[in-house]
Image: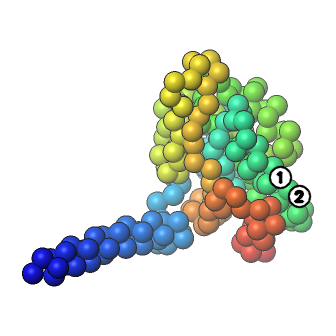
Amino acid sequence: MKKKSSALALAAILVVIGIAVGARLLVWSGGEHATIGGPFTLTDHNGRTVTEKTYAGRWMLIYFGYTYCPDVCPTALGVMSVALDGLSSEERAKLVPIFITVDPDRDRPEVMKDYVTAFAPDLIGLVGTAEQTNAAKKAFKVYAEKAKGGDPENYTVDHSSILYLMGPDGKFVQHFPHGTTAQDLLAGLKKHLD
């Protein structure tokens, strides 16, 4: 009897895990119930207020990070830059590459401008208040927290590292996880932009 109860308990746990994984895959695959993305109000690196409607009708390739990031952000933006260089001018015109800071205390528009233009001339840097940043993070399911125990001025931010491709209608289409190569990102972009 004990063996049968243990087997049933294990089966129930596996079903719950399967449902949770399936739900996450539905969200990440852009299924009809996907909840990635949504309204945001931020300031671009030229000091203009923008919303998701500013980019309506164009694809958005969005990355959340911060300018003081020692390695993950420069790597991801470098991959993005190489992939963007592989697009035709027609494809490039359909796409807006966007870098949204998760460190609004240090990343002001002038800091973002110097940073993003070093990667790509058309990369848009977006900043916001703490509330605006948190709203954007929540909409895109982004994790970002200041690392504990660091220097209050020279700290790092632990954060997720995902490129989000949003369609011209503002809806989530595909994600590219950390470790995606420039070639794979380029192939993914071309598949949608062609």
Amino acid found under the numbered disc labelled 1: Ser
Identify the residue shown where x is 26% and y is 77%.
11
Q: Which residue is mark 2?
A: 85
Q: Is residue 22 left or right of residue 123?
A: left
**Depth check: 117 or 149 in front?**
149
Residue topped by disc 1: 81
Asked whether residue 132 appears in the rendered view, the answer is no
Q: Is residue 185 visible?
A: yes
**SS state under label 2:** helix
* Circle 1: element type: helix
Q: Position of residue 14 (x, y in %)?
A: 32, 74
Report whether 25 appears left or right of 177: left
Q: Viewer-proximal residue, 179 or 77?
A: 179
Q: Give the spatial CA distance, label 2 vs label 1.
A: 6 Å
Name the kind of residue labelled 2 in the image.
Asp
Which residue shows up at 61% across the image and 25% down it? 155
CB of mark 2 within 8 Å of CB of mark 1? Answer: yes
